Image (spheres, rainbow, N blue to C red):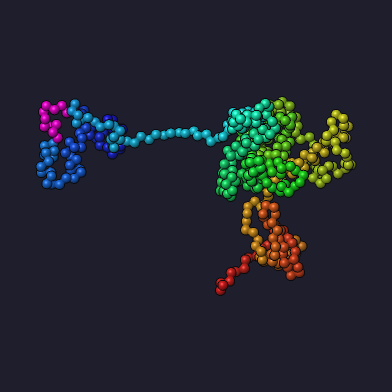
Amino acid sequence: MSPHLLKPFVQNRVTQINDLTGNATWLHVRSEDNPSDLLSRGVALDNLIDCNLWWFGPSFLQDTKSDFIHDDTSKNTAIEDLPELRSTAVSLVCNQQDELFNFDRCSSYNKLIRIGAYVLRFILNSRINSERKQLRQTGSLSVDELSASRLMLVRFAQMQSFPDVYDSLLKNKPIKTNSKQYNRIYGLNVFLDDRNNSKVIRVGGRLCNSTSFDYNKKHPMLLCSKHKLTVLLFNYEHKRLLHGGPQLLLSTLRECWWPLGARNLARKIVRECVTCIRMKDPTDLSPLTPAHFLIGRPLTCPASEDLTDVQPSRLSRYARIEALRQHFWRRWATEYVAELQRRTKWKTQKDDIALNSLVLIKDDNLPPLKWRLGRITRLYPGSDGVNRVADILTATGTIRRSFSKICPLLPEPADLDG
């Protein structure tokens, strides 16, 4: 056979033999007819004295009438049985698709939601036997079906965008701090929502204690701005808002969603919108002055009724300016509230201040050397289980302070004699 089919050690020697012998024909000799195998495998001298194979060679060489080329003893063994054959390395590339839903096949958010709803309807109807076929859903899609489809697609998008985070939350394990996904959600109190078995990652925060906002506002669903679902959602909202500007688009979406990198995506959607390029309308209609941050309006303006819901064509010039001011203040307040979701502190769980710890109480009106000394007697945890307030016993009585006003001292040394 060709030497390239053999292992390197055998291949090199077969090549060398072929180079030295030229066009000589080499045939296979079985081990039982090969005298050299006697020495390579070992044989006793007493047996070697009477061994005809060793002294005279194989029998087919002694028979002048024997045709060695056509003899059965010269037949090659099966190729697959030769141990000297080079092992064939097969490179198999498997394009495994772990995606439960192909988002790239849809170019519209509404179409995507409706496709998901029909998939859920098909699954539901397939599980209902013929005896209960009256329970099967038919006709137009209902609001509940569309809502279930949205939650399902959001869950699939989160599993693709944040696989490590989703797996850790699903198994009730802490999120790995050395992963890139952790850096993207750093500062957000994410959790897995179990309501209606939705299994959707939502964002927590300080708005959870509010009674004025609904559940979606207090705990928006987490999205990645690079995912196809998020892009389709931004395009849909941009058109629904009659091609509103980036800030209006962002503030509207944050009523229910929390997309990472949303500001850049909102600007990109508006910048690449063909309709907006042709219209070239301004997005910010009201100027920003220092008085807006103090009272929400210019200092010289008198009080006015709410004009944000009145048709602009019915307003006078002064009322129109007042309506713009009210629109700006309402918009600023709405966008600012959404920004409160991100935590600026308490991002990581650190060692808590233990009971009976010796602490110093900060006082902005006194130098540090005059700060009072006290001992922790009670801790007050918040709704998230983190202690932020403590009662401190001082020389003049017990006072209550937040942790930001408490300086823990070094722990007392352990009793070596005990």
- Asked if residue 256 is positioned above or below residue 375 in the image, the reply reads above
Residue 120 place in picture, x, y as percent: 62, 32
Is residue 247 shown to the viewer in this render?
A: no
Q: Quadrant of residue 197?
A: top right
In the image: residue 382, left or right of residue 327: left
Instruction: Identify the residue at horizontal 13%, vertical 33% (top origin).
Output: 59
Residue 240 place in picture, x, y as percent: 72, 30
Relative to the observer, which residue lies in front, 25 or 219? 219
Instruction: Look at the image and tell me in which quarter the C terminus lies.
Output: bottom right
Relative to the observer, which residue lies in front, 5 or 39? 39
Is residue 410 shown to the viewer in this render?
A: yes
Residue 274 lies within the magenta run: no
Relative to the observer, which residue lies in front, 65 or 298? 65
Q: Quadrant of residue 222?
A: top right
Residue lying farthest front? 131
Residue 275 place in picture, x, y as percent: 71, 26
Instruction: Identify the residue at horizontal 85%, vertical 38% (top origin).
Output: 306
Q: Quadrant of residue 286?
A: top right
Give the mark count.
Answer: 0
Instruction: Identify the residue at horizontal 58%, vertical 69% (top origin).
Output: 414
Instruction: Look at the image and tell me in which quarter the N terminus lies.
Output: top left
Magenta span of residues? 58-69
Relative to the observer, which residue lies in front, 312 or 67? 67
Instruction: Identify the residue at horizontal 35%, vertical 34% (top origin).
Output: 88
Residue 347 place in picture, x, y as percent: 65, 51
Residue 68 lies within the magenta run: yes
